[in-house]
Structure formats: structure tokens, C-alpha cells
Amino acid sequence: VQLQAFGGGLVQAGGSLRLSCAASGRSSRTYTTAWFRQVPGKEREFVACDFRSGSTTFFADSVKGRFTLSRDSAKNTVYLQMNKLKPEDTAVYYCASSERVIYSTAYRESAYGYWGQGTEVTVSS
């Protein structure tokens, strides 16, 4: 499975961006996709999870109410819609996916075997 994350860019605080995570080579229709982000010098942190092809979604407290997830199954793509962006949302965003994720560990990097290359989001104040 190959993942491609794109859609990052420069946006002013309060603005919006939509990130895409497109998958290819997947054989299963049921999978979990998550977004993580990383600021240089800091650990990668969990942002959002589309668990088992949309059966449920959950978000980090820092983005809850501002970020949403959606999917286009025909395109094997999961979208992270980011609204009301803040300067502290600035990071490189990565998508990750796996066909075997346990809900209780879906916020952990170690739960995912496939990773996209990252897309950079910069929010100016």
C-alpha cells in the first residue's frame, strides 16, 4: 500500500485547508487512516483518525471542533478538513494507514504500517 499526502500550504490564521491522503495498492475495503503532525524538534503527535473506513472518527483535543474527516471510497482517499487554523497548527502532516488497528491504540504511531510522505502546513499569525 502506498499513501500520498498532499494539500498543505501557507494560510493565515483563521483560514482553512483540506489535506488529502490517497491510497493505492490496497486490497481491503476496511482500513483505518490517521493523521499525525510533527513540528521540528518535537515528537510526532496524533491529530485525527478515521477508524475502519468511517465506522467512527476521533480527534485530538487540540483540533476537536475545528478539524473534520471525510472519505471518498471510490478514490481511496481520506480528507482532513482543517478550519479555524491557528499558528500552533503549523507542522508537517502525515497520513498513516493500516488494515488491522485496535481502537484503543489507534492514536499511536506504532499502530500503522503504511505512511505517506508528509505535507507541510504553515499558519501565519
Image: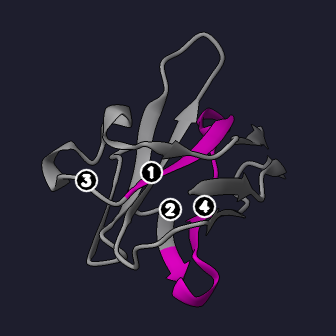
- The residue at which mark 3 appears reads as 101
Q: CA distance from mark 3 to mark 1?
A: 22 Å
Question: SS for tag 3?
Answer: loop
Q: CA distance from mark 1 to mark 2?
A: 6 Å
Which amino acid type is shown beneath numbered disc 2? Phe
Q: Is residue 119 left or right of residue 74?
A: right
**Contact (CB < 8 A) between labels 4 and 2?**
yes
- The residue at which mark 2 appears reads as 67
Going from N to C along the chain, the mark reached first, 3 or 1, is 1
Question: SS for tag 2?
Answer: strand
Residue at x-position 40% and y-position 74%: 28
Going from N to C along the chain, the mark reached first, 3 or 2, is 2
In this picture, is 11 found above or below 99?
A: above
Q: Is residue 54 left or right of residue 6?
A: left
The N terminus, quarter of image: bottom right
Question: SS for tag 4?
Answer: strand
In this picture, is 6 found above or below 61?
A: below
**Label 3 vs label 2, nearer the camera:** 3
Give the residues drawn in magenta, as a range: 70-98
**Contact (CB < 8 A) between labels 4 and 1?**
yes
**Label 3 vs label 4, nearer the camera:** 3
Look at the image and say whether residue 87 sits in the magenta stretch: yes
Residue at x-position 59% and y-position 43%: 94
**Neighbour class for label 3 at 10 Å: few (<14), some, many (≥20)?**
many
All told, the count of numbered labels is: 4
In this picture, is 57 found above or below 6?
A: below
**Neighbour class for label 4 at 10 Å: few (<14), some, many (≥20)?**
many
Q: Is residue 97 left or right of residue 22?
A: left
- The residue at which mark 1 appears reads as 63
